[in-house]
Amino acid sequence: MNKLGIEAIDEGRIKIEVLDSSAGIYIKFTGEIDMEDPSLILDPLFEKIHNGAIDNSIKEVAADFKELTFLNSSGIKAVAKWIMKLSDMDDASRYIITVIHNKSVTWQVTSLPTLSFLVPGAVQLQ
Amino acid sequence: MAIKDPTSDGYIELKFGPRWKYIACARSFIQNFLAISINDQAKADKIAMAASELLENAVKYANGEETQISVKVSPSTEKIAVRVSNLASEESIKTLKLIYDKVCEGNPLDAYVAQMKEAALRNDGKSQLGLARIRYETGGDLNLEIIDKRVSVLIDIG
């Protein structure tokens, strides 16, 4: 179990693990997010991560999408919603989201960098 | 027996009883079709994504069972045309037109980011991101055709 006490998700074709890292929290996505309403899974997860990161003064949350083979636009919406939570926070109290992507997967190269335009300085791409 | 000219246009057409569980199947099928039709893997991936997004819309908003998807390839130019067609209610058509007009205005990246920000504020389970994503990520030309209650979304990718 990670320091935020968040359990892994393993539903259908998607597995999401939340792990501790030296920099803060590491989220690993494996499989496909193509269900009709991914927000049912993703919104509560990102809410817990966001609140946990703030309460524990965590400065970096890494989201590793390398093993995610597909993310539909409803899934992108959920990720965008999480990132937008940082928009009304001051720089000192907010954390950085590191989006880790696989450069050999087309959708990751075209979709994920756009997330960095949502809240300037809140997302770094790796 | 006449042998088809291998440089002539090829296509697939699927009639789709709109069910969510068939979308991943259709996406894989289209990806495999494109893998043997064109040499550009990235383009094949983008089109499979676009087709998947359009089919998701069809499943969510179509009236009836007559959803059709066709993917046409011109081997010599590697130009690809995707068409997804379904019946829809007047309300869905009106909403689609509004989204289409908004998404097709201005720079594709700006339109996509604006649509993402708007989506992030929605709490109704809808994203309305698909068309903006397709326009930006495929770099293709998007067209909307409405004849009575039949809606067709067309994408031409060079």
Image (spheres, coloured by chain):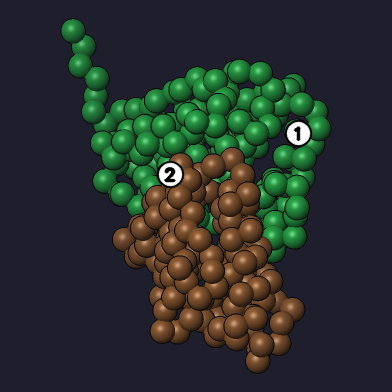
Give the amino acid type for the residue marked by disc 2 in the picture. Arg
Query: Chain B shown in which color?
Result: green
Give the amino acid type for the residue marked by disc 1 in the picture. Ser
Residue B85 appears in view: yes
Vertical side of B2 occupied by A29: above or below = below
Query: Chain A shown in which color?
Result: brown
Give how far across and how far down residue A24 sits, in percent: 48, 81
Vertical side of A36 occupied by A48: above or below = below
Q: Residue furthest top?
A: B1
Give how far across and how far down residue B108 sits, in percent: 60, 59
Q: Answer with left or right where residue A97 lies relative to residue B90.
A: left
- Residue under numbered circle 2: A13
How far apart, in angstroms, are the residues tagged by discs 1 and 2? 30 Å
- Residue under numbered circle 1: B92
Read off the chain for label 2: A
Give how far across and how far down residue A102 sits, in percent: 35, 64
- Residue at image position (59%, 40%) is A36
